[in-house]
Amino acid sequence: MQMNILKEKETPLLSRKRITLEIDYEGSTPSSEQIVSELSKKASVEEKLVELRHIYNKFGKSKAKVIAHVYNDVNAMSKIIKLGKKAKEKIAKTEEDKKKAEEAKVEESAKEEPKAEAPAEEPAKEESKAETPAEEQAKEEPKVEAPTEEPAKEEPKPKEEPKGE
C-alpha cells in the first residue's frame, strides 16, 4: 500500500491537522486500522491520535482518497470529538499498560528493599530469650473459648387493626 499526501492543513484552534491523501493498494480496500497504522508511521504520531473521517473508493481502480485528522494530544482530541467505543478502549488500554508498568516498578523496588533489611532482623531474633517449657506448651495448645449465648430473637408483634367507628 502506497500513500501520497495531497493536502495537509494545520488547524491550530482545534489542535489538529487535516490530511488528505491518496492510497494505492492491491486486492480489497485496506481496513481503517491498516490505514491508521500506516498514516501514524508516516506522520510519526501515535495511532490513537489519528482519526479517519472518510475513505472514498474509486470504482474499478485500486485507489482511494482518505481524509484524516491528526491531533496534537489526547486531551484536544477528547474535547473536540465524541469518542466511539473502540477509541475509548484503545486509550484505556494504553493507560492501563502505563499503570501496570508503574506498579511493576514499585513491586520490584519493594522486593529489593526487604532483602537489604533481612540481615538486620535475623540477629535480633537470635538475641531473644529462650522460652521455658511451660511457655512453649502454652503456645502450642490452642485456647478454647466458652460458647457465647446469642440474644433471644424477638417475635414480631401482630399488626393492630384500626378500630372502625
Image (tube, rainbow, N blue to C red):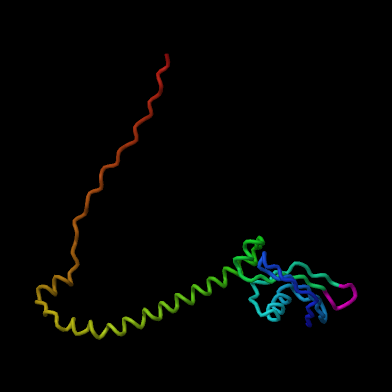
Residue lying at the far top of the rendered structure = 165
Q: Is residue 148 magenta?
A: no
Find residue 152 and report its horizontal and vertical position in percent: 26, 42
Picture layout, residue 153 above or below residue 65: above
- Which part of the image, by quadrant, shows the C terminus? top left
Q: Is residue 135 left or right of residue 119?
A: left
Picture layout, residue 150 above or below residue 8: above
Kindly report the secondary structure that dominates the magenta region of the rendered protein.
Answer: loop
The one of 66 and 60 positioned closer to us in this rendering: 66
Q: Is residue 60 left or right of residue 51?
A: right
Residue depicted at x 40% and y 18%: 163
Q: Quadrant of residue 72?
A: bottom right
The one of 130 and 24 positioned closer to us in this rendering: 24
Residue lying at the far front of the rendered structure = 12
Q: How many marks can you see?
A: 0
Residue depicted at x 38% and y 80%: 109
- Which part of the image, by quadrant, shows the N terminus? bottom right
Q: In this picture, which residue range is highlighted in magenta?
A: 58-64
Find residue 60 and report its horizontal and vertical position in percent: 90, 75
Q: Is residue 108 left or right of residue 120?
A: right
Q: Quadrant of residue 128?
A: bottom left
Q: Quadrant of residue 11?
A: bottom right
Find residue 156 and report its horizontal and vertical position in percent: 34, 35
Find residue 41 and report its horizontal and vertical position in percent: 68, 81
Residue depicted at x 65% and y 63%: 83
The one of 129 and 154 positioned closer to us in this rendering: 129
Residue lying at the far right of the rendered structure = 60
Residue depicted at x 78% and y 78%: 5
